[in-house]
Image (cartoon, grey):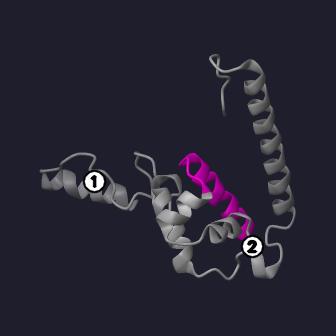
Amino acid sequence: MATWNENADPFAEAARMGALRLEQAREVRRRQAEMADPMGAAETAGIGLLGRYLRRSRLLADLTQQQLADKAGVSQSMVSRAERGLAPSMAVVRLVRMLQPLARLFPFGVCPHDHNCPWQPVKPVEESISDPTAYVEYMLKVAGR
């Protein structure tokens, strides 16, 4: 959630906060509509949600559509169509090229946070076990017996 910037012009800050709340309300309505019919049209199922997530990640990375397009090697119009969910037949290669510059802001199969969770490709080592009996007990505990 964005916070009030005490150092900014109060009128500009009020406008920014109002625009943010308006956009949040729009997003809530979009998500409610999606939940009412989660699949939507068969040819665009889930594309709108993916596009909004792409836009959110791009904005968090503080990139314009053109900057993302330049880094990804695609056109700005392709980024725009993807964000609006209007590119249902986009090649997967193009989608992946657009997501790579966003790195940790668009977790693509890997959790972007530094904690132990199933999305991490390699889990951090909790402790070193040198005693064979303790190792067997640990493996039984992990396996769930």
**The disc label shown at residue 86, or none:** 2
Residue type at tag 1: Tyr
Residue type at tag 2: Leu
Residue extent of the magenta highlight: 45-64
- Mark 1 is surrounded, within 10 Å at the Cα level, by few (under 14), some (14 to 19) or many (20 or more) other residues, namely few
Residue occupying the point 77% across, 82% down: 43
Q: Secondary structure at mark 2?
A: loop
Which residue was labeled with disc 1? Answer: 138
Query: The N terminus is located in which quarter?
Result: top right
Q: Is residue 145 visible?
A: no
Above or below, 1 against 59 in this view is above
Residue 131: image location, x then y, percent: 13, 51
Residue occupying the point 79% across, 44% down: 23
Q: Secondary structure at mark 1?
A: helix
Magenta stretch contains residue 59: yes
Give whichever of 67, 142 is nearer the camera. 67
Above or below, 4 against 101 in this view is above
